[in-house]
């Protein structure tokens, strides 16, 4: 057995073994990389160099800023206002509270950029409210966790920044624009599923639609929604970079949360920043260790091998695209979102581009696949959070989520095979 073959077996085998043993993912990535380097006779100084190189990126600085913005806005009383705005738009429909939940997640996702934050914030308000109005607790939780994935697609999403860094040379502004229509399509598909179930179970309608009420709630929510406008328009128009826009968004969200909505005091701000540090430490350690893992994969020519193996299955681009989706969905069942993006992008992106998928479109495909993975056992973080917030057994929630998995898979296939869904806005505004 050659040294290269042995190194590949050690790298991938030890990584999968530690993932199955439920090691923290950053440790799994880091330890497997160390073992691989030792097998190859490489100096461990190489690991330190690539860990530092992995986080020495100006564009990567946007990630902590966007996470901080999301935490500040999420704990600053924004959720109530966005729920009220969503209620004024779609609350009049059959299963109105489910529709409100879905639309509120679309709005809130544009602020938090995190499915976990969306589930914890919106879910803690909406799930008890829905149960009080006669909705089943498992249905309420299922709607909450599936709609939270809209926030991964709607900008500003820090996962898109991580993908742009991993893909190399992909425009963050174009990725932000590309997420709007797929996010809206996901919301519509979940609303259709909710409507069918609501009709079948005779869930109640809300108050009648009122233009006056809509206008009032829009004015109340304006300051929250403006944060997204500042970030996206600023980046797309070239006024500032993604990192600069993220820094401005943090200052803006601090002012809105403390002085306009007054949902946070300065003690609450320090608590929010403490939460940010906890999250950031995990993300940055993961990014640094993934840089070493990526170096090992490249040195061992694993991406080339994977490309030949996948292309050897079929030459049909539709079959290859479905196979890529299946691989990402499988990875989502055993890994969290950020490591999938960091590890799988260098391997799968060249395959995707070889069959005509634009790197921007592939970014949306990857994020949506990973979002579905957040809802699937055994590692689905959002599934666990939703079960805890909704005080509902995970098995019961999974069963209630099955129809919504179908809605999400339909959206995924549409985004995969109809490039215009993701590429319409980037192409329109690049002219």
Image (cartoon, grey):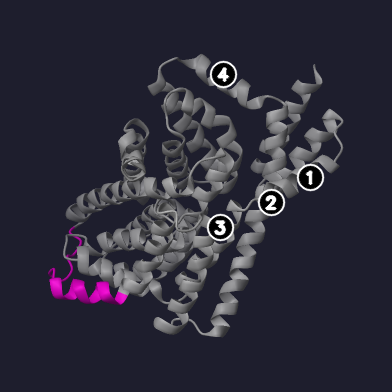
Residue 279 falls left or right of residue 429: right
Task: Name which residue lies at 31% across and 43% down.
Answer: 428
Residue marked by disc 3: 62
Residue 49 tag number: 1
Evaluate if marks 1 and 3 touch, with contact meaning CB atoms under 8 Å apart.
no
Depth check, mark 4 against mark 1: the one in front is 1
* Helix, strand or loop at mark 1: helix
Mark closer to the chain start, 3 or 2: 2
Q: Which residues are magenta?
A: 202-220
Depth check, mark 4 against mark 2: the one in front is 2
Rendering quarter of residue 362: top left
Residue marked by disc 4: 309
Mark closer to the chain start, 1 or 2: 1
Residue marked by disc 2: 56
Disc 4 crowd, CA 10 A, few/some/many (<14, 14-19, 20+)? few
Residue 207 falls left or right of residue 243: left
Residue 146 tag number: none
Evaluate if marks 4 and 2 touch, with contact meaning CB atoms under 8 Å apart.
no
Q: Position of residue 30 (x, y in %)?
A: 74, 44
**Residue 156 visible in the shown view:** yes
Mark closer to the chain start, 4 or 2: 2
Quadrant location of the N terminus?
A: top right
Which is more toward the observer, 113 or 35? Answer: 113
Mark closer to the chain start, 1 or 3: 1
Task: Name which residue lies at 38% across and 45% down.
Answer: 178
CA–CA distance between discs 3 and 2?
12 Å
Disc 3 crowd, CA 10 A, few/some/many (<14, 14-19, 20+)? many
CA–CA distance between discs 4 and 1?
31 Å
Q: Position of residue 212 (x, y in %)?
A: 15, 75
Determine whether 20 is above or below 258 in the image. Answer: above
């Amino acid at each position: 057995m050659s040294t290269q073959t042995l190194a590949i077996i050690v790298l991938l085998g030890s990584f999968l073994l530690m993932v199955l043993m439920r090691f923290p993912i950053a440790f799994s990535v880091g330890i497997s990389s160390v073992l691989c380097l030792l097998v190859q006779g490489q100096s461990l100084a190489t690991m330190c160099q690539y860990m530092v190189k992995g986080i020495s990126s100006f564009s990567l600085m946007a990630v902590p800023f966007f996470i901080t913005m999301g935490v500040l806005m999420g704990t600053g009383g924004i959720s109530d206002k966005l729920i009220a705005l969503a209620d004024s738009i779609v609350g009049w429909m059959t299963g109105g509270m489910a529709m409100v939940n879905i639309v509120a997640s679309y709005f809130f996702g544009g602020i938090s950029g995190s499915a976990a934050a969306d589930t914890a914030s919106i879910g803690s308000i909406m799930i008890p409210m829905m149960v009080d109005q006669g909705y089943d607790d498992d249905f309420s939780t299922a709607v909450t966790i599936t709609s939270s994935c809209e926030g991964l697609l709607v900008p500003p999403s820090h996962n898109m920044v991580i993908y742009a860094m991993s893909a190399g040379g992909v425009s963050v502004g174009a990725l932000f624009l590309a997420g709007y229509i797929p996010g809206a399509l996901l919301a519509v598909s979940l609303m259709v599923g909710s409507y069918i179930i609501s009709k079948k179970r005779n869930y109640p309608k809300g108050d009648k639609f009122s233009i006056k009420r809509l206008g009032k709630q829009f004015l109340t929510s304006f300051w929250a929604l403006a944060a997204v406008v500042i970030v996206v328009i600023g980046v797309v128009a070239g006024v500032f970079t993604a990192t600069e826009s993220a820094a401005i968004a943090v200052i803006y969200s601090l002012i809105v949360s403390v002085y306009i909505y007054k949902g946070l005091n300065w003690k609450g701000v320090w608590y929010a920043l403490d939460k940010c540090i906890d999250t950031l430490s995990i993300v940055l350690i993961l990014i640094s260790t993934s840089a070493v893992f990526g170096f090992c994969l490249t040195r061992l020519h694993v991406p080339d091998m994977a490309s030949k193996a996948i292309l050897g299955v079929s030459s049909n681009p539709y079959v290859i695209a479905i196979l890529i989706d299946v691989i990402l969905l499988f990875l989502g069942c055993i890994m969290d979102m950020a490591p999938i993006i960091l590890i799988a992008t260098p391997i799968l992106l060249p395959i995707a581009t070889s069959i005509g998928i634009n790197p921007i479109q592939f970014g949306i495909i990857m994020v949506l696949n990973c979002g579905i993975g957040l809802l699937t056992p055994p590692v689905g973080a959002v599934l666990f959070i939703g079960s805890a917030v909704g005080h509902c057994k995970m098995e019961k929630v999974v069963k209630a989520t099955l129809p919504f998995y179908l809605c999400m898979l339909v959206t995924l296939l549409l985004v995969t095979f109809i490039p215009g869904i993701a590429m319409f806005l980037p192409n329109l505004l690049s002219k």
